[in-house]
Image: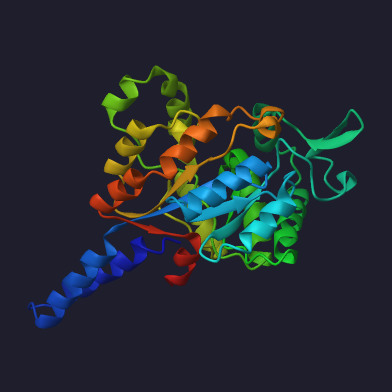
Amino acid sequence: MYASTEKSVKLERLIRSCNPPTEHAEICAVCLLDWRVRRLIVNADDFGFTTGVNRAIVEAHTHGIVTSSTLMANGPAFEQAARLAKTLPNLSVGCHVVLIDGEPVLDARRVPSLASAGSGRTRFRENLKSFVLRAFLGHLEPAEIEAEVTAQIRRLQSSGIAVSHVDTHKHTHLFPAVLRPVLRAAKTCGIRAIRNPFGPRKPLRSSELLARPSLWTRYAEVRILRTMAARFRDSAKRAGLLTTDGTLGVEVTGALDDKLFRAIAEIIPEGTWEFVCHPGYNDDDLRSSNTRLRESREAELRLLTTPEARQLLSNLGVSLISYRDLGEET
Protein backbone atom coordinates (compact mmCIF):
# COMPACT_ATOMS: atom_id res chain seq x y z
CA MET A 1 0.00 0.00 0.00
CA TYR A 2 1.10 3.59 -0.52
CA ALA A 3 1.67 5.45 2.73
CA SER A 4 1.45 8.90 1.14
CA THR A 5 -0.82 8.52 -1.88
CA GLU A 6 -3.73 6.92 -0.03
CA LYS A 7 -3.72 9.67 2.60
CA SER A 8 -3.76 12.34 -0.12
CA VAL A 9 -6.84 10.71 -1.67
CA LYS A 10 -8.60 10.66 1.70
CA LEU A 11 -7.84 14.35 2.26
CA GLU A 12 -9.10 15.26 -1.21
CA ARG A 13 -12.38 13.51 -0.45
CA LEU A 14 -12.59 15.36 2.87
CA ILE A 15 -12.18 18.71 1.15
CA ARG A 16 -14.87 17.88 -1.42
CA SER A 17 -17.22 16.95 1.43
CA CYS A 18 -16.94 20.50 2.83
CA ASN A 19 -19.76 21.97 0.76
CA PRO A 20 -20.29 24.88 1.02
CA PRO A 21 -16.66 25.79 1.77
CA THR A 22 -15.97 26.32 5.45
CA GLU A 23 -13.10 27.10 7.73
CA HIS A 24 -12.65 23.32 8.01
CA ALA A 25 -12.14 23.06 4.26
CA GLU A 26 -9.37 25.64 4.45
CA ILE A 27 -7.71 23.64 7.20
CA CYS A 28 -8.07 20.48 5.10
CA ALA A 29 -6.49 22.24 2.12
CA VAL A 30 -3.45 23.14 4.21
CA CYS A 31 -3.17 19.51 5.35
CA LEU A 32 -3.48 18.31 1.76
CA LEU A 33 -0.67 20.54 0.63
CA ASP A 34 1.45 19.11 3.44
CA TRP A 35 0.80 15.55 2.30
CA ARG A 36 1.58 16.42 -1.31
CA VAL A 37 5.18 17.34 -0.67
CA ARG A 38 7.77 15.06 -2.21
CA ARG A 39 9.53 12.63 0.10
CA LEU A 40 12.69 10.72 -0.71
CA ILE A 41 14.32 7.70 0.88
CA VAL A 42 17.98 7.43 -0.12
CA ASN A 43 18.91 3.76 0.26
CA ALA A 44 22.47 2.44 -0.02
CA ASP A 45 22.52 -1.17 -1.23
CA ASP A 46 25.19 -3.82 -0.55
CA PHE A 47 25.91 -3.12 3.13
CA GLY A 48 28.11 -6.05 4.16
CA PHE A 49 29.61 -6.60 0.71
CA THR A 50 33.15 -5.44 1.59
CA THR A 51 34.71 -3.44 4.41
CA GLY A 52 35.21 -0.57 1.97
CA VAL A 53 31.53 -0.57 1.04
CA ASN A 54 30.64 -0.63 4.74
CA ARG A 55 32.87 2.36 5.44
CA ALA A 56 31.43 4.29 2.51
CA ILE A 57 27.83 3.66 3.57
CA VAL A 58 28.57 4.87 7.09
CA GLU A 59 30.14 8.04 5.66
CA ALA A 60 27.28 8.58 3.21
CA HIS A 61 24.87 8.41 6.13
CA THR A 62 26.76 10.42 8.74
CA HIS A 63 28.07 13.07 6.32
CA GLY A 64 25.63 12.80 3.46
CA ILE A 65 22.05 12.15 2.40
CA VAL A 66 21.76 8.36 2.82
CA THR A 67 18.87 7.60 5.19
CA SER A 68 18.54 3.83 4.80
CA SER A 69 20.63 0.85 3.80
CA THR A 70 20.09 -2.82 3.04
CA LEU A 71 22.42 -5.41 4.54
CA MET A 72 23.48 -8.64 2.83
CA ALA A 73 23.09 -11.54 5.27
CA ASN A 74 25.56 -13.59 3.24
CA GLY A 75 27.99 -10.75 2.53
CA PRO A 76 31.70 -11.30 3.26
CA ALA A 77 31.73 -8.24 5.56
CA PHE A 78 28.39 -8.96 7.25
CA GLU A 79 29.70 -9.14 10.82
CA GLN A 80 31.38 -5.74 10.58
CA ALA A 81 28.32 -4.19 8.95
CA ALA A 82 26.04 -5.55 11.69
CA ARG A 83 28.29 -4.01 14.36
CA LEU A 84 28.39 -0.67 12.55
CA ALA A 85 24.61 -0.63 12.10
CA LYS A 86 24.13 -0.73 15.86
CA THR A 87 26.17 2.48 16.21
CA LEU A 88 23.92 4.37 13.75
CA PRO A 89 20.52 4.88 15.42
CA ASN A 90 19.21 7.09 12.62
CA LEU A 91 20.07 4.66 9.82
CA SER A 92 17.12 2.49 8.83
CA VAL A 93 18.54 -0.96 8.04
CA GLY A 94 16.79 -3.51 5.85
CA CYS A 95 17.68 -6.87 4.36
CA HIS A 96 19.26 -6.95 0.90
CA VAL A 97 18.03 -10.39 -0.10
CA VAL A 98 20.53 -12.20 -2.30
CA LEU A 99 19.31 -15.01 -4.56
CA ILE A 100 22.01 -14.63 -7.21
CA ASP A 101 25.77 -13.90 -7.16
CA GLY A 102 26.48 -15.23 -3.70
CA GLU A 103 26.19 -18.12 -1.28
CA PRO A 104 22.95 -19.23 0.37
CA VAL A 105 22.53 -18.95 4.12
CA LEU A 106 20.76 -22.31 4.19
CA ASP A 107 22.39 -25.64 3.46
CA ALA A 108 22.48 -26.15 -0.32
CA ARG A 109 20.47 -29.35 -0.03
CA ARG A 110 17.50 -27.25 1.09
CA VAL A 111 17.61 -24.91 -1.93
CA PRO A 112 18.58 -27.05 -4.96
CA SER A 113 16.54 -24.97 -7.42
CA LEU A 114 18.48 -21.84 -6.42
CA ALA A 115 22.04 -23.04 -5.92
CA SER A 116 24.59 -25.10 -7.79
CA ALA A 117 27.86 -26.69 -6.71
CA GLY A 118 31.07 -25.67 -8.43
CA SER A 119 34.74 -25.84 -7.45
CA GLY A 120 33.77 -27.42 -4.16
CA ARG A 121 31.58 -24.44 -3.16
CA THR A 122 27.84 -24.03 -3.27
CA ARG A 123 26.72 -20.76 -4.79
CA PHE A 124 23.67 -19.18 -6.29
CA ARG A 125 23.61 -19.14 -10.07
CA GLU A 126 25.45 -16.05 -11.31
CA ASN A 127 23.69 -15.46 -14.63
CA LEU A 128 20.75 -13.10 -14.22
CA LYS A 129 19.27 -14.02 -17.59
CA SER A 130 19.19 -17.72 -16.75
CA PHE A 131 17.69 -16.89 -13.33
CA VAL A 132 14.92 -14.88 -14.98
CA LEU A 133 14.30 -17.65 -17.51
CA ARG A 134 14.03 -20.21 -14.72
CA ALA A 135 11.60 -17.92 -12.90
CA PHE A 136 9.33 -17.60 -15.94
CA LEU A 137 9.49 -21.34 -16.67
CA GLY A 138 8.53 -22.19 -13.11
CA HIS A 139 11.85 -23.89 -12.32
CA LEU A 140 12.38 -21.96 -9.08
CA GLU A 141 10.75 -23.62 -6.10
CA PRO A 142 8.69 -21.03 -4.16
CA ALA A 143 9.12 -22.85 -0.84
CA GLU A 144 12.90 -22.75 -1.26
CA ILE A 145 12.86 -19.01 -1.98
CA GLU A 146 10.67 -18.37 1.04
CA ALA A 147 12.90 -20.47 3.29
CA GLU A 148 16.11 -18.81 2.11
CA VAL A 149 14.69 -15.28 2.37
CA THR A 150 13.39 -16.05 5.86
CA ALA A 151 16.83 -17.34 6.87
CA GLN A 152 18.51 -14.18 5.57
CA ILE A 153 16.12 -11.86 7.40
CA ARG A 154 16.41 -13.92 10.59
CA ARG A 155 20.18 -13.67 10.48
CA LEU A 156 19.95 -9.90 10.63
CA GLN A 157 17.38 -10.01 13.38
CA SER A 158 19.41 -12.47 15.44
CA SER A 159 22.30 -10.00 15.22
CA GLY A 160 20.20 -7.40 17.00
CA ILE A 161 19.09 -5.42 13.95
CA ALA A 162 15.52 -4.13 13.76
CA VAL A 163 14.96 -4.87 10.08
CA SER A 164 12.83 -2.10 8.60
CA HIS A 165 12.38 -3.29 5.02
CA VAL A 166 13.49 -5.72 2.33
CA ASP A 167 14.74 -5.43 -1.22
CA THR A 168 16.65 -7.82 -3.47
CA HIS A 169 20.02 -7.95 -5.17
CA LYS A 170 19.54 -7.02 -8.84
CA HIS A 171 15.85 -6.40 -8.10
CA THR A 172 14.89 -10.05 -8.61
CA HIS A 173 11.68 -9.57 -6.63
CA LEU A 174 10.13 -7.61 -9.48
CA PHE A 175 9.32 -11.00 -11.03
CA PRO A 176 6.08 -12.48 -9.61
CA ALA A 177 7.58 -15.96 -9.12
CA VAL A 178 10.11 -14.42 -6.72
CA LEU A 179 7.93 -11.67 -5.27
CA ARG A 180 5.28 -13.95 -3.82
CA PRO A 181 7.60 -16.02 -1.59
CA VAL A 182 9.59 -12.88 -0.66
CA LEU A 183 6.38 -11.25 0.55
CA ARG A 184 5.45 -14.32 2.58
CA ALA A 185 8.89 -14.45 4.19
CA ALA A 186 8.83 -10.73 4.99
CA LYS A 187 5.41 -11.00 6.60
CA THR A 188 6.46 -14.06 8.62
CA CYS A 189 9.45 -12.11 9.96
CA GLY A 190 7.37 -9.06 10.87
CA ILE A 191 8.79 -6.79 8.15
CA ARG A 192 6.52 -3.86 7.31
CA ALA A 193 7.92 -2.53 4.03
CA ILE A 194 9.37 -3.66 0.70
CA ARG A 195 11.08 -1.80 -2.13
CA ASN A 196 8.93 -0.94 -5.11
CA PRO A 197 11.53 -1.54 -7.85
CA PHE A 198 9.55 0.18 -10.59
CA GLY A 199 10.24 3.78 -11.51
CA PRO A 200 8.03 6.64 -12.72
CA ARG A 201 6.92 6.86 -16.34
CA LYS A 202 9.56 9.51 -17.03
CA PRO A 203 12.61 8.89 -14.81
CA LEU A 204 14.66 11.29 -16.94
CA ARG A 205 13.95 14.03 -19.44
CA SER A 206 14.30 13.02 -23.08
CA SER A 207 17.16 15.50 -23.52
CA GLU A 208 19.19 13.71 -20.83
CA LEU A 209 18.61 10.31 -22.39
CA LEU A 210 19.49 11.52 -25.89
CA ALA A 211 22.75 12.95 -24.58
CA ARG A 212 23.77 9.59 -23.02
CA PRO A 213 23.54 6.65 -25.46
CA SER A 214 25.09 4.39 -22.80
CA LEU A 215 21.80 4.58 -20.87
CA TRP A 216 19.51 3.64 -23.76
CA THR A 217 19.65 -0.14 -23.35
CA ARG A 218 19.05 -0.04 -19.60
CA TYR A 219 16.25 2.49 -20.04
CA ALA A 220 14.52 0.25 -22.61
CA GLU A 221 14.81 -2.77 -20.31
CA VAL A 222 13.31 -0.87 -17.40
CA ARG A 223 10.46 0.40 -19.58
CA ILE A 224 9.59 -3.16 -20.63
CA LEU A 225 9.71 -4.47 -17.06
CA ARG A 226 7.46 -1.63 -15.91
CA THR A 227 4.50 -3.54 -17.37
CA MET A 228 4.58 -5.59 -14.14
CA ALA A 229 4.35 -2.55 -11.84
CA ALA A 230 0.58 -2.70 -11.24
CA ARG A 231 0.79 -6.38 -10.39
CA PHE A 232 3.56 -5.65 -7.90
CA ARG A 233 1.52 -2.95 -6.16
CA ASP A 234 -1.49 -5.24 -5.87
CA SER A 235 0.61 -8.09 -4.44
CA ALA A 236 2.29 -5.86 -1.85
CA LYS A 237 -1.04 -4.39 -0.81
CA ARG A 238 -2.66 -7.81 -0.41
CA ALA A 239 0.30 -8.92 1.70
CA GLY A 240 -0.16 -5.87 3.93
CA LEU A 241 3.32 -4.45 3.27
CA LEU A 242 4.06 -0.78 2.83
CA THR A 243 5.96 0.41 -0.20
CA THR A 244 6.92 3.65 -1.89
CA ASP A 245 5.52 5.10 -5.09
CA GLY A 246 8.58 3.72 -6.86
CA THR A 247 12.35 3.73 -7.18
CA LEU A 248 14.63 6.25 -8.84
CA GLY A 249 18.19 5.77 -10.08
CA VAL A 250 17.97 2.23 -11.43
CA GLU A 251 18.58 3.38 -15.00
CA VAL A 252 21.75 5.26 -14.05
CA THR A 253 23.38 2.64 -11.80
CA GLY A 254 27.07 2.73 -12.58
CA ALA A 255 26.82 6.05 -14.42
CA LEU A 256 25.54 8.46 -11.76
CA ASP A 257 27.15 11.89 -11.64
CA ASP A 258 26.21 15.36 -10.42
CA LYS A 259 24.34 16.25 -13.61
CA LEU A 260 22.28 13.06 -13.65
CA PHE A 261 21.46 13.39 -9.96
CA ARG A 262 20.20 16.92 -10.53
CA ALA A 263 18.19 15.81 -13.55
CA ILE A 264 16.52 13.05 -11.50
CA ALA A 265 15.89 15.31 -8.49
CA GLU A 266 14.28 18.04 -10.57
CA ILE A 267 11.51 15.79 -11.87
CA ILE A 268 10.73 13.65 -8.79
CA PRO A 269 6.95 13.24 -8.86
CA GLU A 270 4.74 13.98 -5.88
CA GLY A 271 4.61 11.24 -3.30
CA THR A 272 7.18 9.09 -1.55
CA TRP A 273 10.04 7.71 -3.63
CA GLU A 274 13.25 5.79 -3.09
CA PHE A 275 16.59 6.65 -4.64
CA VAL A 276 18.85 3.61 -4.88
CA CYS A 277 22.62 4.07 -4.65
CA HIS A 278 25.80 2.03 -4.26
CA PRO A 279 28.55 3.99 -2.47
CA GLY A 280 31.84 2.25 -1.81
CA TYR A 281 35.63 2.34 -1.93
CA ASN A 282 37.35 0.69 -4.86
CA ASP A 283 39.85 -1.18 -2.71
CA ASP A 284 41.48 -4.58 -3.18
CA ASP A 285 38.46 -6.41 -1.76
CA LEU A 286 36.12 -4.75 -4.21
CA ARG A 287 38.43 -5.24 -7.18
CA SER A 288 38.57 -8.97 -6.46
CA SER A 289 34.78 -9.23 -6.09
CA ASN A 290 32.23 -10.24 -8.68
CA THR A 291 30.74 -6.82 -9.45
CA ARG A 292 30.72 -4.37 -12.33
CA LEU A 293 30.37 -1.44 -9.93
CA ARG A 294 33.87 -0.35 -8.91
CA GLU A 295 34.99 3.19 -9.76
CA SER A 296 31.35 4.25 -9.87
CA ARG A 297 30.96 3.50 -6.15
CA GLU A 298 33.56 6.11 -5.20
CA ALA A 299 31.94 8.61 -7.58
CA GLU A 300 28.58 8.02 -5.89
CA LEU A 301 30.12 8.43 -2.44
CA ARG A 302 31.53 11.82 -3.41
CA LEU A 303 28.16 12.94 -4.76
CA LEU A 304 26.15 11.69 -1.78
CA THR A 305 28.36 13.50 0.73
CA THR A 306 28.51 16.89 -0.98
CA PRO A 307 26.62 19.75 0.75
CA GLU A 308 25.27 20.62 -2.70
CA ALA A 309 23.29 17.36 -2.92
CA ARG A 310 21.43 18.04 0.31
CA GLN A 311 20.91 21.70 -0.60
CA LEU A 312 19.54 20.75 -4.01
CA LEU A 313 16.88 18.52 -2.49
CA SER A 314 16.01 21.18 0.06
CA ASN A 315 15.68 23.85 -2.63
CA LEU A 316 13.37 21.56 -4.60
CA GLY A 317 11.15 20.95 -1.59
CA VAL A 318 12.12 17.29 -1.30
CA SER A 319 12.07 15.95 2.28
CA LEU A 320 14.48 13.18 3.23
CA ILE A 321 12.94 10.30 5.18
CA SER A 322 13.92 6.71 5.94
CA TYR A 323 12.14 3.41 5.58
CA ARG A 324 11.56 3.53 9.32
CA ASP A 325 9.67 6.80 8.82
CA LEU A 326 7.59 5.17 6.10
CA GLY A 327 6.44 2.54 8.55
CA GLU A 328 5.60 5.14 11.19
CA GLU A 329 3.33 7.14 8.86
CA THR A 330 0.46 4.69 9.30
Residue placed most toward the observer, 157 or 117: 157
* Residue 185: x %, y % from top left: 68, 59
Q: Quadrant of residue 21?
A: bottom left
Query: What sort of colour scheme is used for the picture?
Result: rainbow
Horizontal side of residue 77 vs 12, given as left or right: right
Horizontal side of residue 197 vs 271, given as left or right: right
Does residue 196 lie above or below 27 as drawn? above
Residue placed most toward the observer, 49 or 187: 49
Furthest toward the right, the residue is: 120
| Residue 250 in sight here | yes
Horizontal side of residue 301 vs 121, given as left or right: left
Furthest toward the bottom, the residue is: 23
Q: Quadrant of residue 82?
A: bottom right
* Quadrant in which the N terminus is drawn: bottom left
Q: Measuring 45% from the left and 38% from the top, which residue is drawn there?
A: 302
* Residue 20: x %, y % from top left: 7, 78
Does residue 268 lie above or below 35 as drawn? above
| Residue 248 in sight here | no
Residue placed most toward the observer, 281 or 2: 281
* Quadrant in which the C terminus is drawn: bottom left
Q: Measuring 11% from the left and 77% from the top, which residue is drawn there?
A: 19
* Residue 326: x %, y % from top left: 45, 64
Horizontal side of residue 247 vs 152, given as left or right: left
